[in-house]
Amino acid sequence: MWFAIGFGDSMIETDMIAWHADGTNSYVEDYYSKRRGAPKIDDQRDIEFIFGQVPASSPVDYPKVYFMTWRPLDTGDADEDFLIPLNENIDMVWSFRSDDADWRIHIRRGYFNIELNEGLGNPDFI
């Protein structure tokens, strides 16, 4: 499967991060969407991540993938990265596809808002 978030209220001119869960082939990608449709990979990738797998806990369960992902609040790439402000409400979008990790059209999407502040810890990274 894949799950993505975007910094903005639509897919147009939006910085995105996507987590592609595919066992040992899992990865995280930094995208920039100029329009509706598949976004392109950001020319300056500012995402760092690690991932691991948790084996199935029973015969009816399935293995799971977990991710730890981070990037600077200000990447220095204002052309294709959202420079994340502290103490301000940020419009966000999300989408996912649950049947495979290939970057194809989402099956669900939605919107939310978030506010980050210094009380979360290191104010340089999220």
Image (cartoon, rainbow, N blue to C red):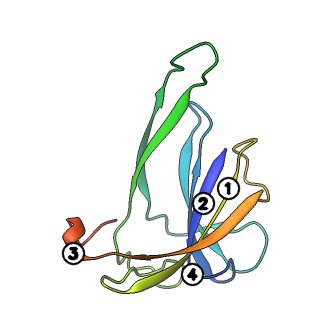
Q: Which residue is mark 3?
A: 118
- Label 4: element kind: loop
Query: Badges 2 and 1: C-beta atoms under 8 Å apart?
Result: yes
Quote the CA–CA distance across marks 3 and 1: 29 Å
- Label 2: element kind: strand
Residue at x 34%, y 74% (from the top left corner): 73
Query: Badges 3 and 1: C-beta atoms under 8 Å apart?
Result: no
Query: Badges 4 and 1: C-beta atoms under 8 Å apart?
Result: no
Q: Vertical placement of 17 versus 19: above or below?
A: below
Quote the CA–CA distance across marks 2 and 1: 6 Å
Q: Which residue is mark 2?
A: 4
Mark 1 neighbour density, 10 Å: few (under 14) some (14–19) many (20 or more): many
Residue at x 51%, y 18% (from the top left corner): 57
- The numbered mark at residue 96 is 1
- The numbered mark at residue 8 is 4
Give whichever of 60, 17 is nearer the camera: 60
Mark 4 neighbour density, 10 Å: few (under 14) some (14–19) many (20 or more): many
Occupied quadrant, residue 72: bottom left
